[in-house]
Image (cartoon, grey):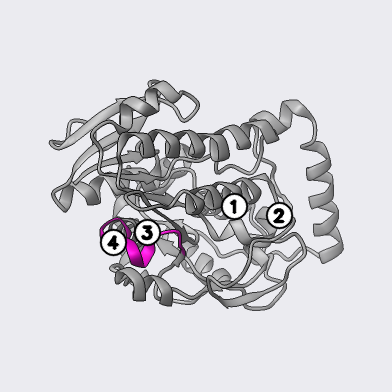
Amino acid sequence: MKVLVTGASGFLGGHLVDHCVREGHHVRALVRPSSAKAPWHGTPGVEPAYGDLRDPRSLRQAVEGVDVVLHSAARVVDYGRRAQFWDTNVEGTRRLLDAAGTAGVRRFVFVSSPSALMRPDEGDRHDVDESVPYPDRWLNLYSETKAVAEQLVRAANRPGFTTCALRPRGIWGPRDHSGFLPKLLAKMLDGRLPDLSGGRRVLVSLCHCDNAATACLRAAEAPAGRVGGNAYFIADAERTDLWAFLARVAELFGGRPPTRRVPAPALDAAVRAAELLWRLPPLAARREPPLSRYSLALLTRSGTYDTTAAARDFGYAPVVSQETGLRDLADWVESTGGVRAFVRAVR
């Protein structure tokens, strides 16, 4: 197949490029002209395409002659104005769908997120499946715009143009410099991450980058009648005790697990204060808040996801275990110059 990968200079996008090449596909990698060179640069079978989700002309050029689009590009940070999220996550997806459908692309796989279903006031949720409806209100702009974009993708499904959405949870693994795990690791090594578990187990689903990339390719190859118009949860095989996992990661890299507890009233006050400050345009547009309702929810709410539908419809099965993933992560960090060099590079 000829595959267009958006967000190809990013963490998951780079792994998507690698997996496509290993399976013998030709890749067109959509990156911004200002993007730094990605690890795949110069790899045979990979053709860079310079463009932007905000530029319809560049998208029309990028999809020309393409069989499959793997759309992983998005604004994933926890700060910014509504217009920024909407233009990238919603309108950018709409522009890409329009270009792909007009160009005769036959398969469009959208990388969504379980965050698309996150409500402001919900508690723990276990073994969530695809029957759960979209909320009327979302926890933050990222959650809202991913949900709207996902619905656009699913509604675009039609004969000859098969669309589907995948919802990997907590993607982690080598070559990640800006995701949840490197940020938490940096805070743990600096002693800046308190234990927010409240003394209870927070059970979560995570998704290794190789498992997420494998799911995207299996969905791209599945019969149209099985996957068209659907959304699927994707996760590792393990159900993870989040704070025990973070303690192990800290020890793996020579740090100490978080032990300092924060009283709930103080934590709530800190979140309210941060979110109030981050309404100021200079902060909201440029910097991530130290704490938000969204980041707190990811660290304190249990959330596990059922991948039965993905296994049934396109044969999804995790290819990397958590144990193997942690060993590979440690090897990669060592190859970057060690954990201190890695932490300095975390954006």
Q: Is 56 on the left or on the right of 183, as rendered?
A: left
Tags 2 and 1 in contact by the CB under 8 Å rule? yes
Residue type at the position of mark 1 = Ala
Is residue 202 shown above or below 21? below
Is residue 220 shown above or below 285? below
Which label lies toward us, 3 or 4? 4
Q: Which sits in the foreground, 273 or 102? A: 102
- Residue 283 colored in magenta in the image: no
Give how far across and how far down residue 15 sits, in percent. Answer: 31, 48
Q: Which sits in the foreground, 178 or 96? A: 96
Is residue 7 shown above or below 21? above
Q: In whole angstroms, how far apart are the C-alphas of marks 2 and 3?
A: 24 Å
Q: Which mark is residue 218?
A: 4
Secondary element at image label 4 = helix
Q: In whole angstroms, how far apart are the C-alphas of marks 2 and 1?
A: 9 Å
Q: Which mark is residue 177?
A: none
Residue type at the position of mark 4 = Arg
- Residue at image coords 44%, 36%: 98
Residue type at the position of mark 2 = Trp
Q: In whole angstroms, how far apart are the C-alphas of marks 4 and 1?
A: 22 Å
Secondary element at image label 1 = helix
Q: Which residue is mark 1?
A: 147
